[in-house]
Image (cartoon, rainbow, N blue to C red):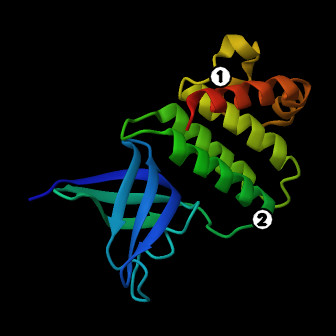
Amino acid sequence: MYQKYHTDALVLASREIGESDRVLALYTRDFGLVRARGRGIRSVKSKMRYALQNYSFASISLVKGKQGWRLAGATALGSSKVRDIKGMQAFARIAGLVVRFVAGEEANKGLFDILCEARSTLAQEKCEAWATIELVCVARVLYALGYISNEALKSALLTHTAYADEHLREAELVREKLLSSINQAISETHL
């Protein structure tokens, strides 16, 4: 008998397999980046279908089998309705970066919180500062993964997950330094 694990997850990417299956890249609170197969979730009868759309936030159940992780259930947390297309496009780029840079299954609650807060902020209706939020989120992701040091930026932006107006104003003041640090970190990883 296999053990069932319950956790919250962000759907970062997916790809279709066969008639109705899908493999999902999930960033989970308890396991980090997990690739899990959802059997039949593309079929019309699937109850998990709407909870596991790309860039959605869900409470999921996973089973670890011989062939890897398998989805056993999912319930949407919050609305999956896209209110601001530019904000969701920005989150899609962040999700792609996370899938590219996170190597395997290792819990990183700080990174999970960074991604949840960014998704929540970018999903709001008429998110005007989406470009600044994306820049700060990418810097925070790279900081959480160890690619940027806080001393290099000399800013408190990397030590929390909030996107209040004062944080966005501070980010605008150090925009060039943030961009330089991000570009340097990405180029040095060769990923």
Image vertical order of residue 85 relative to residue 48, above or below: above
Along the viewing direction, whichever of 161 and 152 lies nearer the viewer: 152
Q: Residue furthest bottom?
A: 44
Q: Is residue 127 left or right of residue 141?
A: right
Question: Where's residue 4, x and y in %?
Answer: 23, 56
Give how far across and how far down residue 183 sits, in percent: 72, 31
Snapshot quadrant of residue 80: bottom right
Q: Is residue 170 left or right of residue 58?
A: right
Q: Nearer the viewer, mark 1 or mark 2?
A: 2
Which quarter of the rendered picture does the C terminus lie within? top right
Res 17 seen here: yes
Q: Amino acid at mark 2?
A: Ile
- Above or below, 141 relative to 45: above
Q: Residues within 10 Å of mark 1 (few under 14, many from 20)?
A: few
Q: What is the secondary structure assignment of the residue under circle 2?
A: helix
Q: Residue at x 39, y 59 (%)?
A: 60
Question: Image height check: is 120 above or below 183?
Answer: below
Residue placed at 78% from the left, 26% from the top?
180
Report the residue at 43% width, 81% height from top.
Answer: 42
Q: Position of residue 108 (x, y in %)?
A: 45, 33
Which sits earlier in the primary sequence, circle 1 or circle 2? 2
Above or below residue 173? Residue 43 is below
The part of the image, by quadrant, that contains residue 173 is top right
Q: Which residue is mark 2?
A: 85
Total numbered labels: 2
Q: Which mark is residue 137?
A: none
What kind of residue is marked 1?
Answer: Thr
Q: Nearer the viewer, residue 99 or 52?
A: 99
109 left or right of 163?
A: left
Q: Which mark, by number, is residue 159?
A: 1
Mark 1 falls on what kind of element? Answer: helix
